Image (tube, coloured by chain):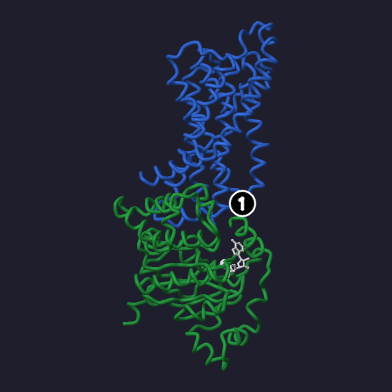
Chain colours: A blue, B green
Amino acid sequence: MDTIYILWLRELKRYYRSRSRMIGSLGQPILFLVALGFGLGPVFKRAGQGNYFEFLGPGVIGMSILFTAVFTGVQVIWDRQFGFLKETLVAPVTRFQIMLGKTLGGATVATLQGIIVFFLTLIAGFRPVSLVHLPLALVFMFLIALFFTSLGVAIASTLQDMQGFQLIMNFVVQPVFFLSGALFPLNGLPKALAIVASLDPLSYGIDGLRYSFVTVSHYGALTSMLVLLVLTFIVLSIGSFLFSKIEI
Amino acid sequence: MMENNEIISVKNLIKKFGATGHEFAAVDDISFSIQRGEIFAFLGPNGAGKSTTIKMLTTLLLPTSGKILINGFNPTVDQDRVRESFGIVFQDQSLDDELTAYENMEFHGVLYHIENSLRKNRIEELLTFVELWERKNDLVKTFSGGMRRRLEIARGLLHHPKIFFLDEPTLGLDPQTRNHIWSYIQDLNEKEQITIFFTTHYMEEADRVADRIAVIDHGKIIRQGTSETLKQETKTTSLEDAFLQLTGHEIRDEEGGAMERMRMRRRMWHR
Ligand SMILES: Nc1ncnc2c1ncn2[C@@H]1O[C@H](COP(=O)(O)OP(=O)(O)O)[C@@H](O)[C@H]1O
Ligand SMILES: [Mg+2]
């Protein structure tokens, strides 16, 4: 328990201390809110889809959680490259505890980032329909964070150096983001795209957020939650296996 | 009787790397043993297999074959018992830059299950010992190479290990800082009766500090004994000459290898 806690705490301290990076990472959500929100908003309205910010808000929150979560998960590569991982691997604790502490820490950080972006979307003009589902929104934020942090840790456990990091960003994170329902509604999509979107875990996360904030949902909140829970469990298991195989 | 006093015993240890058919032995059938309280040195050039040996002794790497006993336990079976028995300073730095000196110590203390109040006292004692108590709340990224080494030494001792592994602890440090580090380590050996296993490719360090030296080259232990016996057996007057006699080359031959240069450069950045 203490082991998991101290690893969790480490992630939070590192997050808090790299405020410049934290602020820098708000640039992207702001850009999306401004460019898409104000740029596409009028078109969206004319198409009879209502207020685009209501639609975009959950998408941008999900996006920022996705990026932060993968980024903190992938920091296993940094830890390995800069030696700190060895310090944890020779300690009399199990690798599972190390991996879990790290993952929970990263997921907490990503959730915090999501909450910050939530406030940004409020400033931009996002108006949740009701606040009764806010706790549910937090649950979905944390689930998205947990899934993608675990995914980051799992992938990072198989990579030797930072070159792999750019690959992950280009071939995993970007497609996951763009093919989810973050930017476009999932109803009435061309069949192929609908299938692809339904294979994208982020789609379920954002759908759940959308339900929590504006009570609109494509898959249904319960389905989304179950899908995320099951996927998180699978990725955590694979991740802890891969992490246990790391050789220094 | 001697057997009981052995804290490290290694028999026919082999580690091979590479795909089957193209494997090479980084550690090639070595045997040695270390007595409680002894200072034992692995002296050898880069690529000799020093770090690979330490990794196998410290549960980070599985041997291809051979037997290891650390404080009576087998690292491949009783991992945690072995891990509690030793402290280690790795060849490459292993601190968290974004944490303070104190936080790095605390992190270690928690991972080694040291109870809170004990932990506090021990951290203060050790940070004072390595003269970093005044800097305890500074982030490690503001530390020089020598300060980082001292902090790693303090951290490695936090859980009262019986054995202390130091893998090239003075690599990349200036001569003055190197002396400083060795005086801590010798002090420690006397005060806490801790067994020291260090690796180096600096002759004079092995000569001056170690009770016994094993000369290692291309994964094999060429000869082991005190500095005196090594010189006598090779009929030479300095350890340099003895090394040359034993291995047929000077220890500096391999210096300036690509890995070494990269490591040095990284240390420079961190200064
Ligand atoms: N993980 C590894 N995979 C393949 N070869 C390795 C690995 N680790 C070390 N080696 C090789 O084993 C040899 C011994 O390395 P090492 O133990 O680091 O030497 P030293 O610490 O004495 O400088 C070197 O030739 C090195 O390149
Ligand atoms: Mg080495």
Task: Please report, as a chain letter, where disc 1 is located.
Answer: A
Question: Please, what is the three-letter code of the amino acid marked with disc 1?
Answer: Gln
Quadrant of the rendered image holding ligand 2? bottom right
Q: Residue at x 43, y 41 (%)?
A: A9
Q: Residue at x 50, y 83 (%)?
A: B224
Locate the N terminus of chain B and report the quarter of the image it occupies: bottom left
Residue picked out by circle 1: A160
Q: Tag 1, which secondary structure?
A: loop
Q: At which x and y percent is residue B37?
A: 37, 75
Instruction: Mark yes or no: residue B63 visible.
Output: yes
Image-quadrant location for residue B156:
bottom left
Query: Could you say which is closer to the camera, residue A231 or residue B197?
Result: B197
Q: At which x and y percent is residue B148?
A: 51, 59
Query: Could you say which is closer to the camera, residue A181 or residue A161?
Result: A161
Image: B223 above or below A218: below
Query: Could you say which is closer to the camera, residue B91 or residue A158?
Result: B91
Image: A239 above or below A115: below
Q: Residue at x 42, y 14 (%)?
A: A132
Locate the C terminus of chain B and report the quarter of the image it occupies: bottom right
Q: At which x and y percent is residue B184?
A: 43, 69
Q: At which x and y percent is residue B127?
A: 40, 59
Image: B78 above or below A173: below
Could you tell whether B264 is left or right of A238 in the image?
right
Q: Residue at x 64, y 40 (%)?
A: A168
Q: Residues within 10 Å of mark 1 (few under 14, many from 20)?
A: some
